[in-house]
Image (cartoon, rainbow, N blue to C red):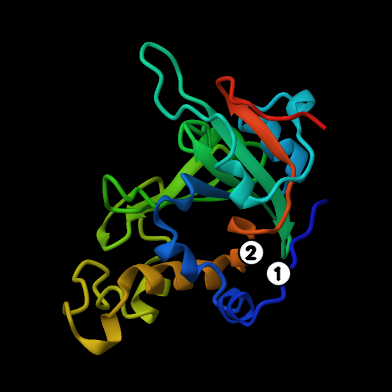
């Protein structure tokens, strides 16, 4: 498996200790992140639609923006690219462009695999988070709208959200806006989810850390290794 390491900077080291909370501020740097437990990185890529033959040499997050990726293509799919790695027992895929994580969530989660999918949605808030297992979405919600939930077990993460001061004990009422315990609700929610599932992702994955990349949709200009 491809592991992850920090880039050595003090900033990356400090942010890396946040688990996945820092993703709340990632914005347009990525389309989404798929975490999967129970499959290696190569199988995660395949379940997301990648042809194993399309794997590239390891590339950095900054190099992604040098590729010819068409997010929107009239009358056709856009281009989707992922970079894959492994951290703390979870495979992950960083999504760029018109990627497939949201559409193939239940396929990725089949045969007992657990999946956490985060989409920042900067142009159409709220950011979205889903948890799926064994071919089904168990729970999901928008960050900042945690009182409106979906899935087969929509209340699954309510105890964690209450403990993080995102929701009141009834699981419906948001903590009072502007009160100090509830400032930065998106970070609190991601922190709670990260602790529940043991998720960690160093910020270096969006910078200089090099990871193999795959095409999952379209025809972007990637150099095959």
Q: Residue at x 61, y 74 (%)?
A: 12
- Picture layout, residue 163 above or below residue 56: below
Name the disc covering residue 7, or none. Answer: 1
The residue sitting at 45% across, 19% down in the picture is 77
Task: Say which quadrant the C terminus sits in.
Answer: top right
| 98 left or right, relative to 172 | right
Reply above or below: 89 against 19: above
Q: Can residue 199 be seen in this snapshot?
A: no
* Residue 196 location, quadrant: bottom right
- Report which residue position mark 2 lands on: 204
Q: Residue 21: percent from the left, percent from the top?
A: 47, 70
Q: Residues within 10 Å of mark 2 (few under 14, many from 20)?
A: many
Alpha carbons under labels 1 and 2: distance apart = 6 Å
- In this rendered view, identify the residue nearer to me: 176 or 80: 80
Outermost residue toward the front in this view: 66
Rendered location of residue 186, percent (x, y): 35, 67
């Amino acid at each position: 498996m491809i592991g992850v390491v920090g880039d050595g900077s003090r900033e990356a080291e400090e942010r890396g200790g946040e688990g996945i909370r820092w993703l709340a501020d990632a914005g347009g740097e990525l389309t989404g992140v798929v975490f999967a437990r129970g499959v290696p990185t190569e199988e995660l890529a395949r379940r997301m639609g990648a042809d194993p033959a399309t794997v590239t040499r390891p590339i950095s997050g900054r190099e992604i923006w040098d590729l010819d990726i068409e997010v929107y293509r009239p009358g056709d799919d856009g281009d989707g690219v992922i970079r894959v790695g492994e951290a703390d027992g979870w495979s992950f895929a960083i999504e760029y462009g018109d990627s497939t994580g949201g559409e193939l969530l239940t396929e990725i989660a089949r045969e007992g695999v657990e999946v956490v999918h985060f989409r920042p949605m900067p142009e159409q808030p709220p950011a979205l988070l889903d948890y799926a297992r064994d071919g089904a979405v168990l729970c999901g919600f928008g960050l900042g709208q945690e009182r409106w939930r979906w899935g087969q077990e929509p209340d699954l993460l309510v105890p964690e959200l209450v403990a993080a001061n995102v929701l009141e004990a009834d699981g419906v009422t948001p903590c009072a806006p502007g009160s100090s315990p509830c400032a930065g609700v998106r970070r609190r929610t991601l922190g709670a989810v990260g602790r529940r599932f043991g998720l960690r992702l160093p910020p270096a994955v969006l910078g200089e850390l090099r990871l193999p990349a795959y095409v999952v949709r379209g025809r972007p200009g990637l150099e095959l290794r």
